[in-house]
Amino acid sequence: MKSFYYAIAAAATACLCVACGREPLAPAVRASLVSDQSSYIATSVGTGASRSFAFSVIAQYTNGSETAIYLQRCLASSLHPNVGVQTVSDSAEPPTFDPPGACTGTSALVVAPGEMRTDTIALAAPVTVDPSTGAYSGPSQVHVEFFYLASTCSSGWPNCPAPFEARTSNVVTVTIPQ
């Protein structure tokens, strides 16, 4: 008799999962995005009001899942995924580092199960400077993490985003010369 109730409970659970749009046995997404260093020193580029700071990151993305992960890129000809940078520090006015150029959205780069890819990413941040002196007035260090627009389906971001931890890097420190 207990097995009858277990069968009913299992069937009800499966129906609830289908009704919610979730597969009861959907594979877990296990992936990691790791930077080559825990800290970087940005270099000053330009002068005066056009001054910015730049640095490069070697990022390694590993798909430990049983299904493919799709990384969005800006142009169909691009060999690298689109990357964003978000601040995790308490600074009131942290610089925003992003790759140059605007994205139009296009086909994704596919990272097959068990595959690892390495990308060198050049990041630059415009900064607020005193126009008369050209001096930078922001924080000397900022803590950031990188992220890819990773998804679990070929229709891409934002239709089926990968879980946060499967598309976000370790936290790194960026030192900005004063």
Image (cartoon, rainbow, N blue to C red):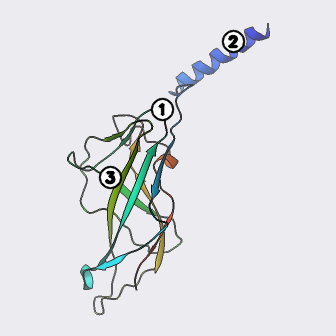
What's the distance in space between the residues labelled 2 and 1, CA to CA?
Answer: 28 Å
Give the class, few, some or many, for how many residues have Cα within 10 Å of label 1's Cα (few <14, many ≥20). Answer: few
Name the image quarter holding residue 119: bottom left
Give the class, few, some or many, for how many residues have Cα within 10 Å of label 3's Cα (few <14, many ≥20). Answer: many
User: Which of these two is toward me, 176 or 37?
Assistant: 37
Q: Earlier in the sequence, mark 2 or mark 1?
A: 2
Give SS at disc 1. Answer: loop
> Residue at 38% across / 63% down in the picture?
57
> Residue at 32% across / 52% down in the picture?
82
Give amino acid for label 3.
Answer: Asn
Above or below, comparing residue 86 to residue 128 in the picture: above
User: Which of these two is toward me, 36 or 154?
Assistant: 36
Q: Disc 1 marks which residue? A: 66
Mark 3 or 1, which is nearer the eye? 1
Looking at the image, which residue sits at the far right? 1
What's the distance in space between the residues labelled 3 and 2, CA to CA?
Answer: 46 Å
Give amino acid for label 2.
Answer: Ala
User: Which of these two is toward me, 110 or 117?
Assistant: 117
> Residue at 23% across / 50% down in the picture?
78
Mark 3 or 2, which is nearer the eye? 3
Above or below, comparing residue 55 to residue 3 in the picture: below
Mark 2 or 1, which is nearer the eye? 1
Q: Is residue 92 left or right of residue 133?
A: right
Where's residue 154, x and y in %?
A: 34, 34
Q: Disc 2 marks which residue? A: 7
Q: Disc 3 marks which residue? A: 82
> Residue at 33% across / 35% down in the picture?
155
Q: Is residue 38 left or right of residue 84?
A: right
User: Which of these two is toward me, 167 or 127?
Assistant: 167
Where's residue 121, x and y in %?
A: 33, 60
